[in-house]
Image: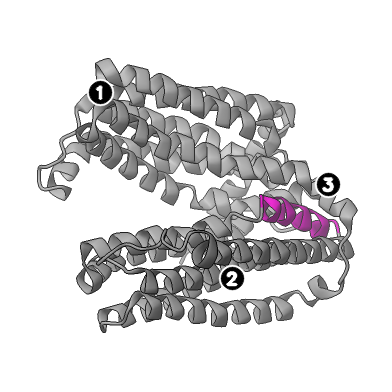
Amino acid sequence: MRSILDLARTRLAQGTAAGFYGLGVQLLVQLVSVPVLVHSWGVAGYGAWVMLFAVPSLLAMADLGLTTAGANAMTEAAAKGDRPRAARIHMALRLITALTGLALLALAAAFIYGLAPGALDFGRAMPRDVAAPTAMLLCLYGFLALLNGVTLAGFRAADAFASSGMLYQTVVLVEAVVALSLALAGCSPVAVALAYLLARLAGTAVLSLVLKRTAAWLSTSWTIDWGEVKALIRPALAALVLPGAHAVAIQGSVVAIGAVGGPAAVPAFSVVRTLSRTALQFAFRFNVASMPRYTVFVAQGNRERASQLVLLNLGVAALLVVPAALGLLLLGRPFIDLWTGGLVVPSFALLAVLVLTMLADAAWIPLSNLVLSINRHGLYTYHFLIAAALSVALGALLVKDMGALGMAWALLGLELVMVLRTWQIARRLGMLHRADLAGASRNLIAELRERRTSLKDSAP
């Protein structure tokens, strides 16, 4: 069996690289799209486009968490050698997702062209005869994104997490380049939306073809096993709660600050929070890449490898997040001053509390993602949602006297609660068994020493 260090240098390294590539694509598209679209359609036109482009994101969540739960179940089945079960789950996901998406498309069409014909009239920024077809095209684009989620779940079950991630993000990059080029050339939002749709249609075909060649066994079943679907309902609902909880904590806190403290209280909090979360997103790429392997190890009953992955995830998070936190604490205010031209000046107290929040994030999110990878996330997602709502409510009360710093303290409390809850769950699931972790640590150290010795011996 290959050592965990070999896996870290190959599959996990490739998955981490794919994650960095994906983040890079997202940041590049965001940075470029704003000036291009503002230049092409004006500030108001860009604002209308942003509102319409939010629709695909909502449609992409319409799988009701089934894709996340199904991907874990398929990976587990494939790891145990039960490919027929993985194929049944995959087909069930495909059909249910397609039917759900088509139903939502019908509702969207009824809303746009029948129920509320005047709702998409943005005046001079984007009149209805432009906004309506643009919205419908973007809904079709979102439907394809919904189907792509099932395809990516199939890739994960086929142990092709890294390559599929690179391919999918390349599709995202290509469609953005094509669409933004048309906008820069003076094309209307309808043409740009059509470009997004056609590029995603081509990308969907490529993804499906590659999956067919990578894992033809996923297409061997053409029936829905309702027993498998029923078994996925609980983890699917728990997975659906997770983005909602994050939205309450992230977007809800900003809305609460603005509502209680006024718009002027928002920028300092938002800028520091954005910096800290960006650092976390880069730091967690290894964690996300390791999730499929953890699913496999647990499914195969390989406690040693699973424990080694737990250690590696905690170690990598500490190794990356602690220096980032220190850098943000020491250089954050000068960087923000330079970045915003001196317009946003967060207090050192606000910066320090949000840095502590960042460190607390790193103490529970890697473990929670490993719990998610084995479909046991229902043990913490509902607690997270309730705690997030309570913390934002508490923060809103504190904002009256403390400003944005009050919300920062409330969110730090939320993260500490989640640290306690997640570590409690990890212990219950045997992820933090002392003997397993001690043995995994000894083996890791032994492997490192062996590698160091072999490198010395091979040196000229």
Left or right of 106? Residue 182 is left
Q: Quadrant of residue 392?
A: top left
Mark found first going from the N terminus, 1 or 3? 3
Compared with 219, 324 (above or below) is above
The mark lying in front, picked from 2 and 3, is 2
Residue shown at the point (60%, 61%) measured from the top left: 107
Q: Which residue is mark 2?
A: 144
Which residue is disc 1 drawn over? 403
Residue found at x 30% / y 25%: 260
Image position, residue 216 (x, y; %): 79, 77
Left/right placement of residue 277 relative to residue 66 reads: left
Q: Nearer the viewer, residue 122 or 32?
A: 122
Q: Verify whether residue 78 appears in magenta.
A: yes
- Three-letter amino acid code at disc 1? Gly
Q: Which of the labelled discs sits on residue 231, or is there none? A: 3
Indicate the secondary structure of the residue bearing disc 1: loop
Q: How many marks?
A: 3
Give the mark, 2 or 1, whose residue is nearer the N terminus.
2
Q: Position of residue 11 (x, y in %)?
A: 61, 62
In the image, residue 310 lies at what x, y percent?
62, 40
Write down the quadrant of residue 36 in the picture. Answer: bottom left
